[in-house]
Amino acid sequence: MAPQQSERKTYTTGSVKTGMTMTEKILARASEKQQLNPGDNVWVNVDILMTHDVCGPGSIGIFKKEFGEKAKVWDREKIVIIPDHYIFTSDERANRNVDILRDFCGEQNIKYFYDIKDLSNFKANPDYKGVCHVALAQEGHCRPGEVLLGTDSHTCTAGAFGQFATGIGNTDAGFVLGTGKVLLKVPPTLRFVMDGEMPHYLLAKDLILQIIGEISVAGATYKSMEFVGTTVESLNMEERMTLCNMVVEAGGKNGVVPADSTTFKYLEDKTSVPYEPVYSDAQASFLSEYRFDISKLEPLVAKPHSPDNRALARECKDVKIDRVYIGSCTGGKTEDFLAAAKVF
Amino acid sequence: MAASLTRISYSSAFTFSASKTSVFSPSLFTSSIKVPTFSSLTVKPLCSTFAPHAAHAISFTTHATSTPASVLDTSTKTFHGLCYVVGDNIDTDQIIPAEYLTLVPSNPAEYEKLGSYALIGLPSSYATRFIEPNETKTKYSIVIGGANFGCGSSREHAPVALGAAGAKAVVAESYARIFFRNSVATGEVYPLESEARICEECKTGDVVTIELGESRLINHSTGKEYKLKSIGDAGPVIEAGGIFAYARKTGMIPSQSN
């Protein structure tokens, strides 16, 4: 009979520091703590808060109601307001919502407001930047190691830059507008290791559909998704954004891709704000690790009615197509249009 | 006494004395839902963690106008009414379709309008609708769902629409995190978790009672009882009307009358 072995938890002594994942490290720095573990609830300093025309007016309403009509936002340079959802429309309420954003930006002297004034011609708007998540990246608001919150579920897209980015509701956003802080629970991390040369017929969307099909639409609920491996390293920023964009479709809290030379090069001409990337420790603990050999993957589709209803594209070759939509934050970047054009 | 209140300048941060318990999420590690316990009697001054922001942060102590914790006690709270049963993965587009999102929840008239569209996005396979045609409120005060309720978008319009329609609680097997967090922050509906798949044993129109303190749901139409996970510290937050109202009622932040 083997002798009984008592379980000795090293971390309980407090003197042994366990390794942290990238997400844990970003939140530790943002909450000014040395060590964080999944499950910890911490007050985090927010670097950027983004909102748009759908949730902005509601968030502003809450901010004014709770902090006062004359209250000032916590930092006029850390708020990015991008009207992008219901624009270039004749709908009065939609246009009124953009007016609400404009009035607020004027009152608060918000530095980054990508306004739309000429509704008849989108090209006549020099400040208009398109889809908010793409605009955030292109305008240099995404930086490694930072905390970015947005009133939109696909805010997780920015994790492609090695930062903590997640979506929040109007009430939380109203709170952040006033205080610059948010109470967050540190998520454990799922690690996805993708290796192998990416075949020319695959796009980043195929990679994330593969993953969501694997873990289901709730497989990453309350968790962080970390994407590493040689394939990930070979992706450009737009492809990494596609990967992180659909993290929420798996229920994920945030997604991260470690920052590297691709990231730094992209940011060179876009931001002069100093940043400090963080990386997962070698001894960090991950909840699970999934490994993929990308060279063996085939193009995928998600069949009705769920993003996790994964199927091989070739299994669906007899499905008649009624309409194709290319656009929005997952698949509406220039590269996506180019890829579609090549098919024709 | 009002004079003992430290004035807060609204360009600054305020602070909660957050304890170690969790907020806004059904914990992965324990089965109960917790939020920081905001103790109205021991509001701590700004802790050193926030020191670099001292220029902007303000601490205050107040013992005036704080609501006794017992007023926000949810241990005797019950809900009684008809239940509306839905399945798994009810997403925010089904709860409140995108076309209605030009309605701003903080605008009272538009808040009511949002309520009239609650769950209008459910497929036609749901023959009995949550809100009857030509009605603006629901007759079902309790929504019973399956797994991953509220998945999809971060739109706070989702729990708002349910609450504005007249729903008091959702009882689901599990929640998507942003929906759960928004429900607590707004105080619109109680996001309760069942331990079994109640959605498979209840039918729309069943008469149910939820005893919050006992964490129990009773279906009077079938005679069955079900155990729920405790709402924990999220209960008083929702009871107060959301995170800001809770903070004011418990004296964590000053009331509007300043």
Image (spheres, helix red, strand yellow):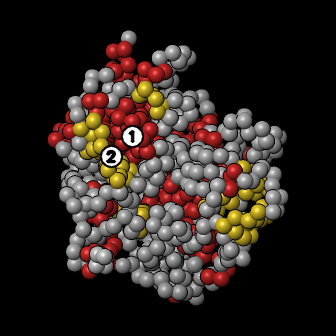
Q: Would you place residue A47 above or below residue A10 in this image?
A: above
* Residue drawn at point x = 38 percent, y = 51 percent: A254
Label 1 crowd bin: few (<14), some (14–19), many (20+), radius 10 Å: many
Outermost residue on the top side: it is A344
Q: Which mark is residue A290?
A: 2
Horizontal side of residue A228 vs B237, given as left or right: left
Residue B228 or residue B67, whichever sits in front: B228
Location of the C terminus of chain B by quadrant is: bottom right
Query: Which residue in the protein does label 1 denote?
Result: A211
* Residue A48 appears anywhere in the view: no
| Percent of width and height locating residue A275 | 21, 53
Which quadrant would the N terminus of chain B be assigned to in this image? bottom right
Amino acid type shown at disc 1: Ile
| Element under disc 1 | helix
Q: Measuring 52% from the left and 82% from the top, which residue is drawn there?
A: B39
Chain ID, mark 1? A
Q: In which quarter of the image is residue A7?
A: bottom left
Where residue B29 sits: x, y (%)?
45, 67
Where's residue B49, x and y in %? 32, 74
Residue type (three-letter) at the residue carrying disc 2 = Tyr
Are the residues tagged 1 and 2 within 8 Å (C-beta)? yes
Question: Does the image show residue A209?
Answer: yes
Residue A302 percent across, percent down from the top left? 48, 31
Q: Which of marks 1 and 2 is nearer the N terminus?
A: 1
Q: Nearer the viewer, residue A220 or A260?
A: A220
Q: Which residue is drawn at 22% across and 46% down?
A: A259
Work out whether residue A266 or residue B204 is closer to the camera in this orientation and state it: B204
Q: Distance between the residues labelled 1 and 2?
A: 9 Å
